[in-house]
Amino acid sequence: MPATVFFAAGPANWEEYRNPLNAAFTAAGLDIVMSDRTDDPASVDYIVFAPGGVIEDFGPYVNCKAVLNLWAGVERLVTNPTLTQPLARMVDWGLTEGMEEYVVGHVLRHHLGMDAHIHGQDGVWRNSVLPPLARERPVAMLGLGELGQASARALTALNFPVMGWSRSPKAIDGIECRSGEDGLAHVLSRAEIAVLLLPLTENTRDLMNADRLALMPEGAVIINPGRGPLIDDTALLAALDEDRIGHATLDVFRTEPLPPDHPFWAHPRVTVTPHIAADTRPSSSSQVIAENIRRGEAGEPFLHLVDRSRGY
Ligand SMILES: NC(=O)c1ccc[n+]([C@@H]2O[C@H](COP(=O)([O-])OP(=O)(O)OC[C@H]3O[C@@H](n4cnc5c(N)ncnc54)[C@H](OP(=O)(O)O)[C@@H]3O)[C@@H](O)[C@H]2O)c1
C-alpha cells in the first residue's frame, strides 16, 4: 500500500516542490501518493510543512509518522501544542552552501571596506588605508550548528580567526569554541565581526541586548542571518548612533517583510537584506524529505529531528 504524503506548505510551494518531490520519491524507490489537500486526515502518513501553510491544528493527523518542515528554523512549530508527531527540520546542502556564501560575502565586504570604494568614486585617489589581513580580523560565530559550522569553516579557509559559541561545549579543528555566559563574553569582547546563526528560542531571544553589544570592540560589525528577535533592535540602533557598533547587516527581522517606515531602512550603517541569506532548494531538499520518508517506512530513525525541550 502506498504511503500518503500531505503537502501542507501552501500553493506557491506546491507548484515549486511537486515535481522535485515526486522525482525524489521515485529515485528513492518509494511508493507514495502525495496531494496538497486531504479530506481524511487519519489516512496521512507524513506531512510536508512550511509555516504559513494550510494547517495549524495537527490533532486530526492521528496516524502521521512525522512532520517534515521545509525550512531550517522551527520556532513557530515547536510552540504549537497540537503538534505531537516527530518533527524534522530541514538540513540541506543547498541551504548550507547558500548560507556559507552569504556569510563569506558580507564578512569580506566589511573586512575589505568595500563600501568606501563602491561609494567613493569622486576622483580622489585614497590609497593610504590598507585593511588588515583576514588573519588579523577576529570573527565570532554565534551558533555552531549545521549553518554556523559550515560558515565558520569557510571563514577559517580564508584565514579569519574564528571563535565559535554554542550551547554545549565543542571541539572543532581550527575554531576556538566556547559556551556559556563567560564564553559569550570572551568571544564578543574580541570579535570585530559577529555572525548570528542561532535558532530563536526562549534562551536566545534578545541575546544581543545593550549589555552584550557593549562588550564588542568599538566599530564592530554585526551580521544577522539567524532570526530577527536575537537582537534588541532599540539597543542596536542606540549602539549604532553612538558609534559603538560600526555596521549591522540584517537579513531577518521581528516583523517580515520589514515595514517601510522601520528605522533600519534609512539608517546609513544598516544594510537590510530581505531574508534571502539561504533558501531551501527544491531539488536538494526533496532528496532530504524522501530520505526521511524512506527511513520512516523502513522503521529507521528520522534525520534532523527537533528536540522540543530545547526548542530547536
Ligand atoms: N536567513 C536565512 O535565510 C536562514 C536560512 C536558514 C536558517 N536560518 C536560521 O539559522 C538558524 C541556525 O540554523 P542551523 O541549521 O545551523 O541550526 P542548528 O544546526 O540547530 O544549530 C543551532 C546552533 O545554535 C546553538 N544554540 C542554540 N541555543 C543556544 C543557546 N541558548 N546558547 C548558545 N548556543 C545555542 C546550538 O548549540 P549546540 O550545538 O550546543 O546544540 C547550535 O550550535 C536557524 O534556526 C534559522 O533560524 C536562517
Image (spheres, helix red, strand yellow):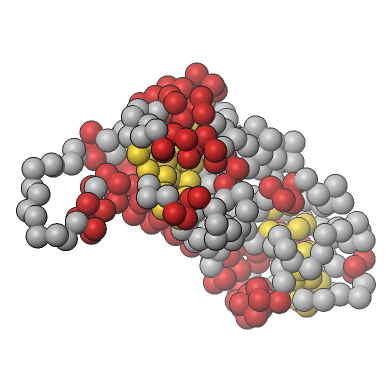
Q: Residue at x 65, y 32 (%)?
A: 203
Asked if one can make out residue 247 in the rendered structure from this viewpoint, the answer is yes
Q: Position of residue 232 (x, y in %)?
A: 56, 37
Which of the two residues, 82 or 48, is positioned nearer the viewer here? 82
Left of 292 or right of it: where is 151? left
Q: Report x, y in % for residue 10.
A: 72, 72
User: Outermost residue, top direction?
Assistant: 182
Residue 292: image quadrant is bottom right
On the picture, is 112 further left or further right than 276? Answer: left
- Image point (74%, 51%), residue name: 77
For residue 121, what is the image quadrant? bottom left
Mark count: 0
Q: In the figure, 109 relative to 180: above or below?
A: below
Residue 298 visible from this viewpoint = no
In the depicted structure, whether residue 185 falls above or below residue 256: above
Which of the 4 image quarters holds residue 40? bottom right
Q: Which residue shows up at 61% across the image and 68% down it?
A: 286
Could you tell me which quadrant the C terminus lies in? top right
On-image quarter of the N terminus: bottom right
- Residue 307's place in the image compared with 46, above or below, is above
x and y percentages locating residue 193 in the rendered image: 36, 38
Q: Residue at x 24, y 40 (%)?
A: 134
The front one of 15 and 303 is: 15
Report x, y in % for residue 206.
60, 35
